[in-house]
Image: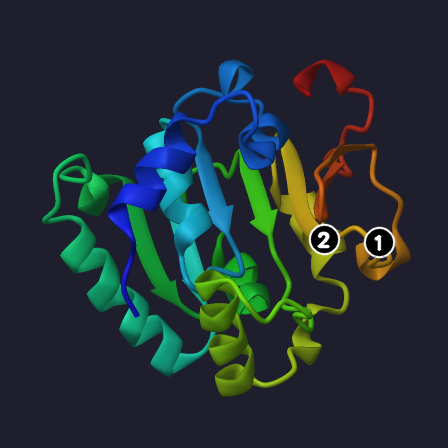
C-alpha cells in the first residue's frame, strides 16, 4: 500500500469541487478533531489533515492497519507532508470498541464514516486498491448501530460517504446532503442537540 502524493496535493487544492471538504465545512470547523472510523486506505484521513484538522484514523483489520502505518510513515517523508505524524494518529481497533473506550479523551468534533460497499468500477487504480481491501477484510457486518453511537459521540456532526444508489446507513435519513457525481455525503447532527443547525 502506498500513497500518490501528487494526487493528494491535487485533491487538497481542489477546494471548490471537493465534496468531502464541503461536507466537513472546513471554514466553520478549523483545527478540530476528526475521527475516521473506517480508515481503510487512509486517503480521506490524509486529506483531512491537509485541511487543518487533527485526525484519528481507526482501522479494524490488522493487516490493513499495518500496511497503512507503513504507507503513512513513508508519506511523512515527502515534501508537503512533514507534519503528518503530528496531525494523524492511527489506531488499530473496531469502530465500536474505539468509541466505547473514548471517555476522557479529547472531544470529538466530527466523525467520518465510509463503510465498505461492493465496487462496480473496474478501471481506476484507486478502485483496484479498494477492491483489494474489500477482498482482504471481507464483509463488514459490524456497522449495525454504528451511526447511532457516532451521533452520540460527535460534538458537531457525523459525515457518511455513500454511493448515490445506496440506502441511508441504518435506514436513517440525514439532516442534509452534499451530492456528487457518483456518490454523496450524508450529514447527521448530534443526537444530543438536533437544534444546532448553525453548525453546518
Q: Is 166 placed left or right of 12 in the picture?
A: right
Whether residue 138 is situated above or below residue 25 in the rendered picture:
below
Q: In the image, what residue occupies the spot 41% across and 52% down?
A: 43
Q: How is the image coloured?
A: rainbow
Q: Is 27 placed left or right of 179 in the picture?
A: left
**Residue 178 x, y percent position in the rendering:** 72, 32
Can you identify the residue that label 1 sits on? Answer: 168
Q: Nearer the viewer, mark 1 or mark 2?
A: 2
**Residue 117 x, y percent position in the rendering:** 68, 69
Whether residue 125 is situated above or below residue 114 in the rendered picture:
below
Q: Secondary structure at mark 1?
A: loop
Can you identify the residue that label 2 sits on? Answer: 162
Of the image marks 1 and 2, the number of the one nearer the N terminus? 2
Q: Residues within 10 Å of mark 2 (few under 14, many from 20)?
A: many
Whether residue 70 is situated above or below residue 30 in the rendered picture:
below
Q: In the image, what residue occupies the spot 40% across and 57% down?
A: 42
**Residue 32 x, y percent position in the rendering:** 44, 28
Q: Hey, which quadrant is residue 91 in on the image?
A: bottom left
| Quarter containing the C terminus | top right
Amino acid at each position: 500500500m502506498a500513497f500518490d502524493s501528487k494526487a493528494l496535493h491535487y485533491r487538497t487544492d481542489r477546494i471548490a469541487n471537493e465534496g468531502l471538504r464541503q461536507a466537513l465545512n472546513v471554514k466553520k470547523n478549523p483545527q478540530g478533531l476528526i475521527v475516521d472510523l473506517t480508515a481503510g486506505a487512509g486517503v480521506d484521513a490524509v486529506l483531512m489533515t491537509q485541511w487543518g484538522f487533527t485526525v484519528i484514523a481507526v482501522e479494524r483489520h490488522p493487516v490493513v492497519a499495518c500496511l497503512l502505518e507503513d504507507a503513512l510513515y513513508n508519506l511523512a517523508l515527502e515534501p508537503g507532508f512533514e507534519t503528518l505524524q503530528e496531525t494523524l494518529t492511527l489506531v488499530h481497533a473496531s469502530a465500536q470498541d474505539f468509541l466505547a473506550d473514548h471517555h476522557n479523551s479529547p472531544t470529538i468534533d466530527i466523525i467520518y464514516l465510509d463503510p465498505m460497499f461492493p465496487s462496480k468500477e473496474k478501471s481506476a487504480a484507486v478502485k483496484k486498491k479498494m477492491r483489494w481491501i474489500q477482498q482482504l477484510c471481507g464483509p463488514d457486518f459490524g456497522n449495525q448501530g454504528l451511526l447511532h453511537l457516532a451521533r452520540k459521540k460527535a460534538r458537531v456532526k457525523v459525515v457518511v460517504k455513500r454511493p448515490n444508489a445506496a440506502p441511508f446507513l441504518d435506514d436513517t435519513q440525514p439532516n442534509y446532503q452534499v451530492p456528487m457525481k457518483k456518490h454523496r455525503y450524508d450529514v447527521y447532527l448530534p443526537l444530543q442537540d438536533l437544534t444546532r443547525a448553525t453548525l453546518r
